[in-house]
Image (cartoon, rainbow, N blue to C red):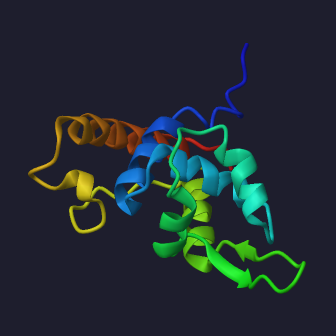
Amino acid sequence: MKSNTDDYLKYWRVIRQWIKVKYGLTQCDLDLLLFLYSEKYFGKDKFDDYNDLLGWDVNRFFRLQQDGWIEKFRNRVGKRKALYKLPIKTTRMIQLIYRKLNGEEIPVSQSQNRMFAKNVSYTDKVYRDMIIEMNALIKQRRHHAPE
């Protein structure tokens, strides 16, 4: 019989959509920040290496920097290139993703999740229903977990 211990990516699409709505990020922005998460410091060249795999957006680096998702660690001086890092805002957002993937419920109140507001798009309503289903499964697993 198949073991389901490694199925934490089952709801990745739902969690990803929730994060994109919550933080106003695009899919490409999120993919790039996830790539950079393990890099303590990185140059624009490292950013560009992964950015080349994504949809073309000439302003992505500067927009992410302006919006506070990337911050400068060291200015360019002589032959030393400028270095960047992910600020606490970004690391907390990514840690939130991992917590949700590991079984933490997504909030369903309007004040904590704008997908649960009254005037949302059809797409948000569909994802909202899946969040409710996902949370129910998480509660059920927690209740039936062996001690």
User: In screen coordinates, is 111 left or right of 12?
Assistant: left
Q: In the rendered view, would you say 86 is above or below 15?
A: below
Residue occupying image coordinates x 25% and y 36%: 123
Horizontal and vertical percent position of residue 89: 55, 75
Residue occupying image coordinates x 53% and y 41%: 56
The N terminus: image quadrant: top right
Q: Nearer the viewer, residue 10 or 41?
A: 41
Q: In the rendered view, would you say 112 is above or below 117?
A: below
**Does residue 103 appear anywhere in the picture?**
no
Q: Nearer the viewer, residue 84 or 136?
A: 84
Q: Residue furthest front?
A: 78
**Does residue 118 appear anywhere in the picture?**
yes
Horizontal and vertical percent position of residue 112: 30, 66
Residue occupying image coordinates x 66% and y 37%: 53
User: In screen coordinates, is 37 left or right of 93?
Assistant: right
Q: Residue furthest right?
A: 79
Figure label count: 0
Residue occupying image coordinates x 18% and y 35%: 122
Horizontal and vertical percent position of residue 111: 23, 68
Q: Nearer the viewer, residue 45 or 88?
A: 45
Q: Quadrant of residue 99?
A: bottom right
